[in-house]
Image (tube, helix red, strand yellow):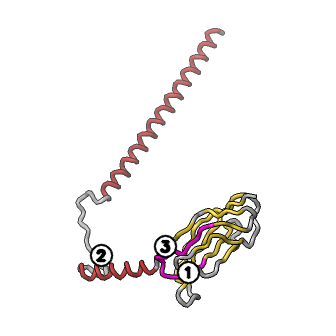
Amino acid sequence: MDKETNKNKRLWIILAIVVVLLIAVIAVLVVFLLKKNNETNVQQVSENSGNTGMVLEYETSAVATDPVTLQKLYDEMLAEAEEGTMALEMQTEASSSNGTDFTCYIANAINNKYDMFVVIYNDETQEEIYRSGLIPLGSRIESFTSSKKFEPGTYVGTIVYNQVEDDHATIHAQVNIGLNLNVNY
């Protein structure tokens, strides 16, 4: 019986060694294939990165190709972009000691071109909690009263800056900015 038991032990040991070797071979093959695939991807990126001496040609549907016309189009684009810019002056924190009256700093920068008003939303409920009147250029709001009473804690809100045209009815541009509402009482 001892011979048979020793024989069984040897078979199990040999079987265990074969399984371990098989797992090791599979692991080496997987690593090799992944490395080869990665090298292929790197080579494709290198070939497409512009280092191959490829010469770019003009787009056939381009509006202009001569420098004078391109400069004119560029200048017009900058003028349009300048018209739509909005300088923001604000603090991203508002604090309250009673849950409704908040101290803050929200300003209409002097270098803006339009009056504005702001609307503040509670992000959790999407409800409007404050809407200002018109804020002239160079003016600011240092406090606001929320239409909702907040319990102590920190809440996430959004300020929507709304630039209005001279008719005070047409919205010229809007920008959304995050605001933390800190309530401690």
When the figure is inspected, residue 123 is found, relative to residue 61, above or below; the finding is above
- Disc 1 residue type? Pro
Relative to residue 182, is residue 19 drawn left or right?
left
**Element type at marker 1?**
loop
Bin the neighbour count of mark 2 within 10 Å (Cα to Cα): few under 14, some 14-19, many 20 and up: few
Mark 3 / mark 1, whichever is N-terminal: 3
Residue type, mark 3 in image: Ala
Q: Position of residue 135 (x, y in %)?
A: 58, 79
- Left or right of 139 on screen, residue 64: left
For marks 2 and 3, give the CA distance.
36 Å
Identity of the residue drawn at 62% across and 68% down: 158
The residue to which callout 2 is attached is: 59
Residue at which label 1 appears: 136
Look at the picture and state if 42 lies above or below 107: above
Q: Which residues are magenta?
A: 104-117
Corner quadrant of residue 122: bottom right
Q: Quadrant of the C terminus?
A: bottom right
* Residue under the point 32% across and 81% down: 73
Please give the residue where the numbered disc 3 appears in the rendered image. Answer: 87
Q: Earlier in the sequence, mark 2 or mark 1?
A: 2
How crowded is the residue under tag 3: few (<14 C-alpha within 10 Å), some, or many (20+)? few
Which of disc 3 and disc 2 is earlier in sequence? 2
- Residue 106 lies, with reference to residue 69, above or below; the image says above
Residue at horizontal 54 percent and vertical 29 percent from the top: 19
Q: Position of residue 112 (x, y in %)?
A: 48, 78
**Residue sitting nearer the eye, 92 or 96:** 96
Name the element at disc 2.
loop
